[in-house]
Image: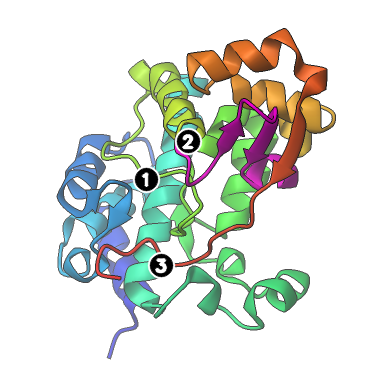
C-alpha cells in the first residue's frame, strides 16, 4: 500500500518536466480554495477526495521558483506553497483537534526537539524537500522580508490569519497582502482595540515575530494600526505612547468547518 506522501511523489514524477521551468497554475489552487474554504474555515473531509490539490502540489514540486519572473512571482509562489502544503498535511494526517497533534511531543516539547508538524520535510519544491518552518523562516521571512507575509500564511488554526478564497498572484500581490492585513487587524477574534482604555490586544504573531514589525511593542502597534479600522489607526497614530499593548492567547484549534 502506498503512503499518502509516496502517492503524491508519484504524481510529481508523472508531471515533472526537465529543468523545472514551468510556472504553476495558481488558478487551480484558487479553484480548491473556492470550493472548500468559507470564512477562513476548511472542509477537510471533502477536500481529501479532490484530486486538484495533489495536482497543484505536483506543479509546485516541478517548479524551480528561481526561474520565476520577479520577486512578486516568487513570493506569491512560496505563500501559496506554504498554505497548500499545510492543507495537504491536515488532509493526510487528520488531526482530531489541532495541527499540534501532528508530530511528536506536542507544541512546547516538540518545538524544542524540532519534531512538530512544521518540522516534517514533506513539502517538495523544485525537486527539493522542505519543512513548513523552512518555507516560512528561511525562504519567506529570510529572503523577502515583507512583514505582511505574516497576514498571508495560514497554519490551520483558529487564531491564524484566515485562509483566503483565492491564491496569491504576482500581478495583484501587493493588493492581496494589504487586504489580508485589513481582514486580520479588523477581526476582533484575532486583534482587538479598546479606544476608551487605549489598549491594543494584539495577536501573538506580533510578539513572536516582533523584529519583523520593528523594535518593541509600540513599533508592532504602529505596524498593526496601518491595517486597523480608520478611527483606530487615527487614535493610535495621534498618541502612540499613550497606548498599552497586550497579546492575546493563541487558539490552536483546527480551522475545520465540521468542528
Q: Considering only vertical position in the picture, is 7 above or below 226?
A: below
In the displayed structure, does residue 171 sit left or right of residue 82? left
The residue at 70%/8% (across/down) is 238
Q: Residues within 10 Å of mark 3 (few under 14, many from 20)?
A: many
Say which residue label 1 marks: 163
In the picture of the structure, the residue carrying the numbered disc 3 is 89
**Vertical position of residue 61 compared to residue 173: above or below:** below
Callout in the foreground (3, 2): 2
Q: Residue 170 location, x and y as percent?
A: 38, 22
Residue occupied by mark 2: 184
| 1 or 2: mark nearer the eye | 2
Tell me the quadrant of the picture where the N terminus can be found.
Answer: bottom left
Q: Earlier in the sequence, mark 1 or mark 2?
A: 1
Indicate the secondary structure of the residue bearing disc 3. helix
Q: CA–CA distance between discs 1 and 2?
A: 10 Å
Q: Which of 148 and 235 is in front in this view?
A: 235
Magenta-highlighted residues? 187-208
Amino acid at each position: 500500500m502506498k503512503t499518502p506522501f509516496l502517492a503524491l511523489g508519484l504524481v510529481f514524477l508523472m508531471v515533472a518536466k526537465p529543468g523545472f521551468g514551468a510556472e504553476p497554475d495558481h488558478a487551480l489552487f484558487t479553484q480548491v480554495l473556492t470550493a472548500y474554504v468559507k470564512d477562513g474555515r476548511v472542509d477537510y473531509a471533502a477536500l481529501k477526495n479532490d484530486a486538484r490539490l495533489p495536482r497543484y502540489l505536483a506543479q509546485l514540486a516541478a517548479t524551480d521558483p528561481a526561474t520565476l519572473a520577479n520577486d512578486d512571482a516568487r513570493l506569491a509562489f512560496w505563500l501559496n506553497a506554504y498554505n497548500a502544503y499545510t492543507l495537504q498535511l491536515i488532509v493526510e494526517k487528520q488531526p482530531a483537534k489541532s495541527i499540534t497533534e501532528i508530530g511528536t511531543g506536542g507544541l512546547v516539547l516538540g518545538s524544542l526537539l524540532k519534531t512538530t508538524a512544521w518540522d516534517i520535510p514533506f513539502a517538495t519544491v523544485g525537486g527539493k524537500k522542505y519543512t513548513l518552518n523552512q518555507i516560512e523562516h528561511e525562504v519567506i521571512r529570510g529572503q523577502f522580508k515583507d512583514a505582511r507575509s505574516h497576514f498571508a500564511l495560514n497554519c490551520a488554526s483558529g487564531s491564524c490569519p484566515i485562509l483566503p478564497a483565492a491564491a496569491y498572484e504576482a500581478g495583484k500581490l501587493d493588493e492581496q497582502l494589504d487586504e489580508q492585513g485589513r481582514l486580520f487587524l479588523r477581526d476582533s477574534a484575532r486583534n482587538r482595540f479598546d479606544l476608551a482604555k487605549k489598549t491594543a490586544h494584539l495577536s501573538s504573531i506580533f510578539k513572536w515575530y516582533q523584529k519583523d514589525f520593528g523594535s518593541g511593542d509600540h513599533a508592532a502597534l504602529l505596524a498593526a494600526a496601518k491595517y486597523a479600522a480608520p478611527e483606530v489607526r487615527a487614535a493610535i497614530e495621534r498618541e502612540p505612547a499613550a497606548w498599552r499593548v497586550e497579546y492575546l492567547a493563541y487558539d490552536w484549534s483546527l480551522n475545520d468547518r465540521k468542528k
